[in-house]
Image (tube, helix red, strand yellow):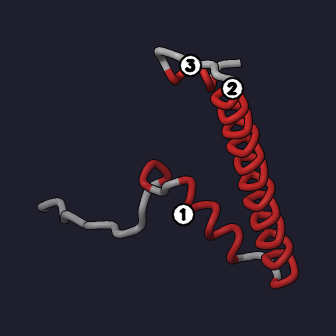
Amino acid sequence: MARQNTISFSPTAAEISPVDALWVLIQGQTKAVRKALTKRLIEDEQIAKAKQETMVKETLTRAFDELHAGKVYDDARSLFDD
């Protein structure tokens, strides 16, 4: 008897990306849990953005202060070194 070739369309564990697996888990949660996760993700993003803005402001302030003080660098990258 000839062996039948069957094609399975269900993905194996190796074919599921971590993002897809996490998405399935999130979708299975209650609406309250999904809202709490969304709120936390937004807050984390806002905190990261605020930190980046602070770092840019401090770096530019220092660079302008040094420029006004007459410090000139051959290599401007030294302005950003601590």
Residue type, mark 2 in image: Glu
Density class for disc 2 (Cα within 10 Å; few <14, some 14-19, many ≥20) is: some
Residue 67, horizontal then vertical, whole percent: 63, 29
Give the mark nearest the N terminus, 3 or 1: 1
For the N terminus, the quadrant is bottom left
Q: Where does the image place residue 26, in percent across and percent down from the top left?
A: 71, 70
Relative to 71, is 62 above or below? below
Q: Quadrant of residue 62?
A: top right
Number of the front mark, 3 or 1: 3
Q: Residue at x 82, y 79 (%)?
A: 35
Residue sticking out furthest to the left: 2
Q: Quadrant of the C terminus?
A: top right
| Mark whose residue sits in front, 1 or 2 | 2
- Mark 3 residue crowding within 10 angstroms, few (<14) / some (14–19) / many (20+): few
Q: Are marks 3 and 1 in contact (CB under 8 Å)?
A: no
Q: Secondary structure at mark 1?
A: helix
Report the front residue among 70 and 60.
70
Q: Residue at x 76, y 64 (%)?
A: 41
Instruction: Give the Cα distance between marks 1 and 2.
Output: 49 Å
Q: Amino acid at mark 1?
A: Asp
Sequence-wise, which precedes: disc 1 or disc 2?
Answer: 1
- The residue located at (87%, 81%) in the rendering is 32
* Residue that carries the numbered disc 1 in the rendered image: 20
Q: Marks 2 and 3, how far apart in space?
A: 8 Å
Please give the residue where the numbered disc 2 appears in the rendered image. Answer: 66
**Dot 1 crowding, Cα within 10 Å, few <14, some 14–19, many 20+:** few
* Disc sitting over residue 72 in the figure: 3
- Report whether 5 appears left or right of 26: left
Q: Which mark is residue 1?
A: none
**Element on which disc 3 rests:** loop
What type is the residue that disc 3 sits on? Val
